[in-house]
Amino acid sequence: MTFVVDLLAATLRNATPLVYGTVGETYAERSGVLNLGIEGTMYAGAFAGFATAWATGSPLIGLLAAIVVGIGAGAIMALMTVTFGANQHVSGIGLTIGLIGLSEFANRLIFAGGELQRIEPMPIVNPLAGLGEIASIFDQYALTWVAFLLIVPAAWWLLQRSSFGLEIRAVGENPEAADAAGVSVARTRYLALMIGGALMAIGGAFFTLALLGSFTLDIIAGRGWVCVALVIFGRWRIGRGVIGALLFSLIFSLQFRLRILPGFGELPFELLLALPYLVVIGALALSGRNVAYPGAYLKPYRRS
Amino acid sequence: MTAHEPALELRLITKRFGDLVANDAINFDVRRGEVHALLGENGAGKTTVMRIAYGLTQADEGQILVGGRALVVRSPRDAIAAGIGMVTQHFSLVAPMTVAENLALGRSTGLRLKPGEAGRDAAAVSERFGIRVDPSARVEDLSVGQQQRVEILKALSRNCQILILDEPTAVLVPAEVDALFATLRELVADGLSVVFISHKLAEVRAISDRVSVLRRGERIGTVDGGTDERELARMMVGRPTFGVDRPTDAAQPSGAPILRIRGLSADGPHGLPALSDVSLHVRGGEILGVAGVSGNGQTELVDVLSGMRRPTAGSIAVTDVELAGADPGRMMGAGVGRIPEDRHASLIGDLSVAYNLVLEHLDDFRRGGRIDERGIRARAADLIERFDIRARPDDPVATLSGGNIQKVLLARVLSRGPRVLVVSQPTRGLDVGATEYVRSQLLARRHDGTAILLVSEDLDELLALSDRLIVMYEGRVVGEVAGADADLEHLGMLMAGRGRAA
Amino acid sequence: MRISPWSTPVLVLAAVLITFVITAGPILVAGANPIEAYTAFVITPLTSQFTLLEVLVSATPILFTGAAVAIAFRAGYWNIGAEGQLLLGAIAAAGIGTLVGGLPGIVALPIMVAGGAVAGAAWAFVPALLRVRFGIDEVVTTLLLNPVALLLVNGLLHGPWRDPVTGFPESPRIAASAEFPALIERSRLHLGFLVGLVVILAAWYVLSRTPAGLRLRAAGLSPHGARFAGINVSRTLLGAALVSGAIAGIAGVSEVAGIQNRLTGGLSPGYGYTGIVVATLGTLTMPGVAIAAIFLGDLSIGASSAARSLGIPSQLGAVVQGVLLLTTVALLAMRRQRSGRTGEADKGGSVTGDVAAEGQPG
């Protein structure tokens, strides 16, 4: 029983950065832009959040800094792909390389390779505490609560039920029709990328501000890429993407815990770590055939 | 707007595209509560003149008046503000979104947050104009007829007084056409003005109060909607102009057909059938012309014969070799030369003229493992001269003029001595010199015994070049005539959907 | 002779200059003088024989990955997985390297290189198959296999290949005959550099002089036009993906056989991703890749030297790479816009025209 409770709690916890990242990337891709800068954005968010929290003593201000960095990263991606119309794959990789480099550069400058600095991580909150063992599933960081109870429903509602979300979706499907209806394609894409960037950065900051309380190199370890896969797996829908994030996180959390069970100890722990990635690829192979990408995916818009 | 002024008036509208005069001093007007049809073949200029009225393009000369007042219309937004709405052939709808969402797009003001309102607004508009749509249905799930209704509703919901419909029945089945006409009659009774662009005689006569016929950019005349069909057809197609001399040296076509198509069916965009049970044959040394307004299945026919589209049924045989569903390589291997209508997509613009000329049979230019550059250059130089291509071998194809691009395609295909030639719109957009050249090339091939399938919107061209003519309408072959005996009125009627001959 | 401001060499030069202007920011923040920094970065490594050779050493792996990425991109196949393919090649080299001890170098080395190539191609196979058969976007699949490859490396190093003597996560040393000999006495410049040049030359030849290369370029420029002309685009893509993986695999062999002589955890600090920078900067041509690889090798050595002499963190090198990639691709897009040619835009993003130098053969 404890095993299950512990597993579920870990699943929610580990899914948090994936949820932020996947929702953020969904916004970008729904507007028609593949944002491969997500890995770098999460990284930069993690670092900026940590450094600011360390300098100011307040994780909240750190979070704010991460958001600002994320918005900036999104704006750069928009500048490249919307204003310049540059190749989206290469722009995203360039942004990732640049942001990771910049973060490590700043890390070196500020912390000068000395001993690992730590900050007081954000607190764990549980309004259901004391209601028995099962309630300990909800011993989660505030950012996790916010992710599932606030961000996900709000992001879904904004995308599906508001005029702004309507414009994002239209611009991603048929920018000519949107343009003809008076929607500014460029402005909408900029906003979608900036919102997406902010969310991605929060996802990255979760590692440093909550989970670990410190910043290490390779802290994101490819989870940005996982989010890109999850968006496709989720068919560009917020709900399905979140489910994908939870599934990935479940497998990820499971493999950690399986190792202590008899029989599993012999399996190399790297194999188990690799399992979630392989499952995602497998899921894509099974369900990703000829999926309906957003109509304007990867195409810069120029009024002809 | 008084009752005496026309709702919309176009005066002396002239539009040129380079040397081509698409609209030549067109006068046109439509009154309140009237359906005025614009009738003509492709290239007649009817879509162009209305695109000008809707602000999608600008006239070189002329005036637009709405309710008697001259207007400057620079974009669809100006047109919409003036009360002009247009439903084009390619819908401006976002497919995966619902009807309500499509109607709401771009119309929100203020806070940009609008839960549920879209649905209510859609229902209200639907009610107001009496056009039944399901606001919560997704556009891509709707039939094309229903999608069109959404487009009309979109236009009406912006208070349009003048509704332009461009070939609205091109994508509708008869039942939907009836429904559309019923709706139009109600709207017109309420005072709406409708401009009905079409090439279909029966429908034009059924719905219009007046008909203006355009041909080659000129308005031939404006007559009552009930005018006799044959008269309208005659106005539409006119008389053949001078062209290439009819092939009098008719090298008798060899006996058996080289190209034989039986029961060919294929789907078009949206997965709807575009070709239905098409059968035809072409003999060696014969040009079979395929007449018909574009959009009646010709593109799909050429796509299938090019190997770029798989048919859903039927057989294609070239000298008894079965080729239905074959890919381009096999088609070429069987001796089929292909010159489709989209030149740019059939060549590789960023590659040089020389490479494009040999791309279909690169393996003939190998020396050991490498490309025989000298051989290619020699071949290219030869073809450039033989086919009068005004370009250098290293020029990227995309930098060439339309005429020269077509010559590159011609050279590529003809230089290999194909048994069958499938060619579509060979002279579209070309100047007089290039046009003459292309046509003479086709005739030369004919003389050499090639079986030629010629698809063209240019009836004069078809009449000048074809030994036999078939007409395609709505994906079927609706008639066949011998080139020399072609009765233009009859052809016009067939093209416009009247008179299904055996 | 008028040189157009938009000609490729000028464009790349402009990208470099703009990049240096932008990265002057972080340099200033680090408390250094940008002019001194760029001198240390770009010029200093070229001033002594020792550092010059180190530049070439540094350029070696990215010669391979740059070529690998360029070939794939040229075909319209977005191979972002060169990093993982490199690691698989390294694994193969480390494994084969310990087995060929009895063979003379002239036999052992080709076997290792071949093994690494096969391993890299194998790692590239599944994403390529998924793309060609099922239309599944290769960007995500190749990308996700990168962390998996790294896990594979770590799994081997912490498990069956852990050095039995030291207990460190390093594989046993490869046989002496499996090592790439040094090209110049007492330098680290090894045979891998020559192999890299040979690969570049061969790739250039195939791309610009053979029918297969022309078909590959055609497929990347216009899949529809290529298909129309009878080219089997699926097969071409698959071939390009496998060749790309194979070359990236050889990069891994080069690092193991030439530098580390064993499999280590930190074998690749992102050479696969740097390969994307090299390929783009070289506008997807082989001569361009060669020049770009040396330039980036120069920057990499320069970054270390600037770290020592000026106190600028060496990670600035990565910042420069990222900004360089962005400015290059932005300028290429602007040039494309001006010429009014937008090429064919498939869902798969096969618009290589906006990254490749237009009309260039090799």
Image (cartoon, grey):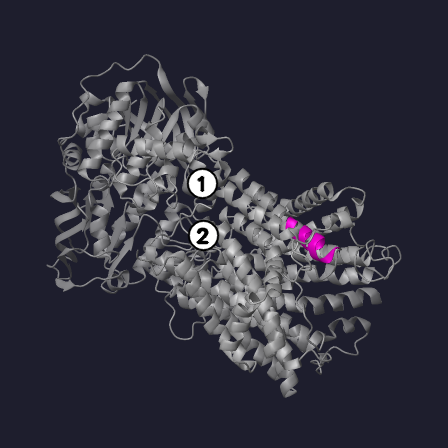
**What amino acid does circle 2 point to?**
Ala
For disc 2, the neighbor class at 10 Å (few under 14, some 14 to 19, many from 20) is many
Q: Residue at x 50, y 57 (%)?
A: C280
Quadrant location of residue B308?
A: top left
- On residue B271, the disc is 1
Q: Quadrant of the N terminus of chain B?
A: bottom left
Residue C212 placement, left or right of A226: left
* Res. C15 mark: none
Reply above or below: B115 against B272.
below
Give the answer, above or below, for where C306 lies relative to A278: below
Q: Nearer the viewer, residue B28 or C304?
A: C304
Q: Secondary structure at mark 2?
A: loop
The numbered mark 2 sits on a residue in which chain?
C
Q: Is residue B197 left or right of residue C136?
A: left
Residue flagged by tag 1: what amino acid is it?
Answer: Gly
* Front-lying residue, A133 or B1: A133
Question: Is residue A137 one of those drawn in magenta?
Answer: no
Q: Can residue A132 be seen by looking at this rendering?
A: yes
Residue at the spot 44% in from the left edge and 39% down from the top edge: C226
Disc 2 to disc 1, C-alpha distance: 35 Å
Please state which of residues B240 and A275 is positioned toward the viewer in this rendering.
A275
Q: Are marks 2 and 1 in contact (CB under 8 Å)?
A: no
Per the image, the residue denoted by label 2 is C356
Is B419 on the left or on the right of B493, as rendered? right
What element does badge 1 sit on? helix
Using a 10 Å C-alpha cutoff, classify the residue at mark 1 as few (fewer than 14 neighbours), some (14 to 19) or many (20 or more): few
Instruction: Provide the residue span drawn in magenta.
Output: C250-261
Coordinates of residue A42 in the picture (x, y in percent): 60, 69
